[in-house]
Image (cartoon, rainbow, N blue to C red):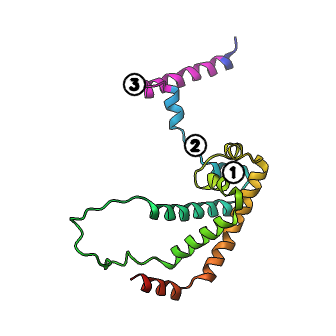
Amino acid sequence: MHPGLSDAEQLLHLRRLQIEDRFGHKHGTAPTHAAAQRRREGALARLYVSGAISLGELGAAEEIAAAAERIGSAVGVRTMSMETRVSGGRRGDGSFWEGLGQVRREMAYRHWRSDLGRHAGAIEDLILRDIGLVATASTHRIGVRRLRGMLVIALGAWGFHCRWARDCVNDDDLTRAHARIA
């Protein structure tokens, strides 16, 4: 009697059969595997799409996350083989020396992080750990609107901290620091 409903129901049935055919052999339900295959955007990307943050602020968040990752990777546990080590000297390929830009980004991150104050953990959860806005607000007992505002201010301040680091460290300072280490 209702051809539109019948067609929609038939399409739904065909889609369910396709999902069963594609994922039916795996452990778990086929709809669960189909849902897991769909791409989900990160928390900050969703904020950008919704208009809560600008493209520049999204870029600042990516730079902050990269700087934090670089700092965190320098502290991690590493292993090495003593058999392949020939000498204890510095490598000739220049890998010992840090670049000026990298030093400035790390200094900017540390300065930016210190200015966040007592809500630094909440801002870092959003930027570094990609936890959603509502979940972060609930965990840290902050209102969603207030947390969104703090995030926008924190991301807007990133440029100031980068300029501060640029003015604070120059190439001569970095060369003197490398000379002291070597």
Give the structural element (helix, strand or loop) at label 2: loop
Q: Are marks 3 and 1 in contact (CB under 8 Å)?
A: no
Q: Main secondary structure of the magenta part?
A: helix
Q: What label sits on residue 170 in the rendered view?
A: none
* Circle nearer the N terminus (2, 1): 2
Q: Which residues, given as a range, are shown in magenta?
A: 6-30
Mark 3 crowd level (few <14, some 14–19, many ≥20, 10 Å Cα): few
Residue 167 at x, y percent in the picture: 63, 83
Count of numbered marks: 3
Q: What label sits on residue 47 in the rendered view?
A: 1
Which residue is label 2 attached to?
Answer: 40
What amino acid type is highlighted by mark number 2? Arg
| C-alpha separation, residue under disc 3 versus residue under disc 2 | 24 Å
* Circle nearer the N terminus (3, 1): 3
What amino acid type is highlighted by mark number 1? Leu
* Circle nearer the N terminus (3, 2): 3
Give the structural element (helix, strand or loop) at label 1: helix
Q: Residue at x 45, y 65 (%)?
A: 74
Q: Nearer the viewer, residue 178 or 51?
A: 178
Quadrant that contains the N terminus: top right
Q: Quadrant of residue 23?
A: top left
Q: Is residue 38 magenta?
A: no
What amino acid type is highlighted by mark number 3? His
Q: Residue at x 66, y 72 (%)?
A: 161
Which residue is label 3 attached to?
Answer: 25
